[in-house]
Image (spheres, grey):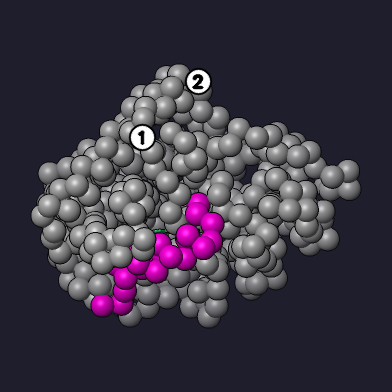
């Protein structure tokens, strides 16, 4: 499996310097944090905004200024650990991944410069303004079809199964050119990888998921081989054309790794954004009514959802050298937990941060898509999907409400935040 960036180095991070605040209690898997991370993060921002969580193995940053600074100093804070499983991979699962042909290479989120910039330049053409304008009517038609099918089935309906997974999953799979017939299998693999990377999969689950990760990877290899023989109008064929023009611009392994990464990055997190947007709005009837009356407020509202209840609450970095952040010494090898949720609710940045305010002027200053050289490539696509979904639902289902007898529960996860299910009535 080599130096894929997907399994961790196995190296232990250095202990916290003696002068650094230490907090043994912090865990994104704790029940209270999973249910609602914001109260705890507000207290930590006030009391110890920068602290070591030795049981977790990370230095935790909760303020916007510190999180933004780490993203900006990419020469000092490397992103090579962002795809490492947070739960150590057991020996049996590692053995399943040790097959010779499972060899993804770091390409975007976990790749250092200069390779990262070289690869990103080509991949970002797939997310251009022109491409987004072409995709817009396609996503809209699909959103309408999925929503109509959910409504026709009658209430109550489980949103994530009916619409939330399908819309972003199908969108990214068509963009890279995966055939429609494979959608259910790809969505299952994607759910598995999420649990393997940022969840708490036990040993038996890890072994089963390791097999599905190998199958997912082989599927991407097969797709690239097919497109080399039969190019089509999709991103895979565009990347292969770059390779054909100049083999040193992108290797076939890099193209396969891009597909393996993008098809995962574009799905589950967006389904959480769609669900979180509905939770924000359907628990605030006045805001929902305001959007029905004035749908042109939907794009600004999506930015506030991304700030107020982001589907991504954290991201990671590792210090390449001894340095300092906010006056705290940081030793080389220290792993850093960037609390995007903490930064998005920082009172130094946002007035009344715990209030959901559709008219907030600086909502776009949220940091849910990161900052700097690794800034999320799919930000426009994700935002557009959420805008289209809300436009569709406000127009077609104005009486939409959360099912009163189905309490929300959140999936325990180190990085993503979204409900396990979202039951709706209308
Ligand atoms: C609401 C949905 C999404 C959120 C909150 C989100 C968030 C993020 C964050 C925080 C980063 C890391 C930025 C950094 O390290 O500085 C990132 C990177 C990335 N995201 Fe997203 N993302 C979303 C949707 C998408 C979608 C739909 C796609 C693709 C279809 C995508 C593709 C990527 C890629 C390829 C990177 C790595 C870029 C690079 O390293 O150059 N994301 N995203």
Q: Is 116 a magenta residue? A: yes
Residue with the mark numbered 2: 91
x 13%, y 58%: residue:
231
Which quadrant is the N terminus positioned in?
top left
Viewer-side residue, 393 vs 405: 393
Q: Is 187 a magenta residue? A: no
**Highlighted magenta segment, given as a residue range:** 110-130
Residue 126, relative to residue 333: is it above or below? Answer: below
Give the quadrant of residue 135.
Answer: bottom left
x 33%, y 27%: residue:
211
Please provide percent x and percent y for residue 154. Answer: 16, 48
Q: Which mark is residue 115?
A: none
Mark sitting earlier along the chain (1/2): 2
Which quadrant is the C terminus positioned in?
bottom left
Q: Is residue 202 left or right of residue 121?
A: right
x 50%, y 54%: residue:
111
View quadrant of ligand 1 = bottom left
Viewer-side residue, 144 vs 71: 71
Please provide percent x and percent y for residue 133. Answer: 24, 76
Please tell me whether mark 2 sits on a helix, a strand or a loop: helix
Some atom of ligand 1 lies within 8 Å of the CB belonging to the residue at label 1: no
Point out the frontmost of discs 1 and 2.
Answer: 1
Q: Main secondary structure of the magenta part?
A: helix
Question: How many numbered markers are drawn?
Answer: 2
Residue 326, relative to residue 291: is it above or below? Answer: above
Q: Is residue 361 left or right of residue 205?
A: right
Please provide percent x and percent y for residue 200. Answer: 50, 31
Q: Which mark is residue 102?
A: 1
Please tell me whether mark 1 sits on a helix, a strand or a loop: loop
């Amino acid at each position: 499996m080599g130096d894929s960036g997907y399994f961790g180095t196995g190296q232990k991070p250095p202990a916290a310097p003696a002068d650094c605040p230490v907090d043994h209690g912090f865990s994104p898997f704790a029940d209270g944090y999973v249910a609602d991370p914001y109260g705890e993060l507000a207290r930590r921002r006030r009391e110890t905004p920068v602290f070591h969580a030795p049981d977790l193995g990370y230095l935790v940053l909760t303020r916007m200024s510190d999180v933004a600074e780490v993203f900006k100093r990419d020469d000092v804070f490397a992103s090579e650990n962002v795809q490492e499983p947070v739960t150590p991979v057991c020996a049996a699962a590692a053995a399943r991944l040790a097959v010779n042909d499972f060899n993804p290479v770091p390409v975007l989120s976990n790749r250092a410069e200069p390779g990262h910039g070289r690869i990103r330049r080509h991949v970002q053409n797939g997310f251009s303004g022109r491409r987004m304008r072409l995709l817009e009517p396609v996503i809209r038609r699909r959103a309408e079809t999925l929503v109509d099918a959910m409504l026709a089935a009658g209430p109550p309906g489980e949103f994530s199964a009916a619409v939330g997974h399908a819309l972003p999953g199908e969108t990214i799979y068509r963009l890279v050119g995966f055939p429609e017939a494979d959608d259910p299998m790809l969505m299952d693999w994607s759910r598995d990888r999420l649990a393997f990377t940022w969840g708490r999969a036990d040993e038996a689950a890890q072994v089963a998921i390791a097999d599905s990760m190998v199958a997912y990877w082989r599927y991407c290899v097969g797709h690239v081989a097919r497109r080399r023989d039969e190019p089509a109008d999709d991103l895979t064929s565009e990347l292969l054309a770059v390779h054909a023009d100049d083999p040193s611009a992108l290797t076939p392994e890099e193209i396969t790794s891009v597909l393996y990464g993008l098809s995962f990055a574009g799905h589950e997190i967006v389904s959480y954004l769609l669900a979180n947007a509905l939770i924000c709005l359907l628990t605030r009837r006045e805001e929902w009514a305001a959007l029905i009356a004035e749908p042109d407020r939907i794009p600004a509202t999506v930015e506030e959802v991304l700030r107020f209840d982001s589907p991504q609450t954290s991201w990671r970095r590792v210090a390449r050298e001894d340095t300092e952040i906010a006056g705290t010494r940081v030793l080389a090898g220290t792993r850093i937990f960037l609390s995007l949720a903490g930064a998005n609710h920082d009172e130094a940045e946002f007035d009344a941060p715990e209030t959901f305010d559709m008219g907030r002027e600086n909502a776009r200053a949220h940091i849910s898509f990161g900052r700097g050289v690794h800034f999320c490539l799919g930000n426009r696509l994700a935002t557009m999907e959420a805008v289209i979904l809300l436009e569709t639902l406000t127009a077609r289902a104005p009486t939409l409400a959360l099912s009163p007898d189905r309490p929300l529960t959140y999936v325990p996860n180190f990085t993503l935040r979204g409900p396990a299910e979202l039951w709706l009535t209308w």
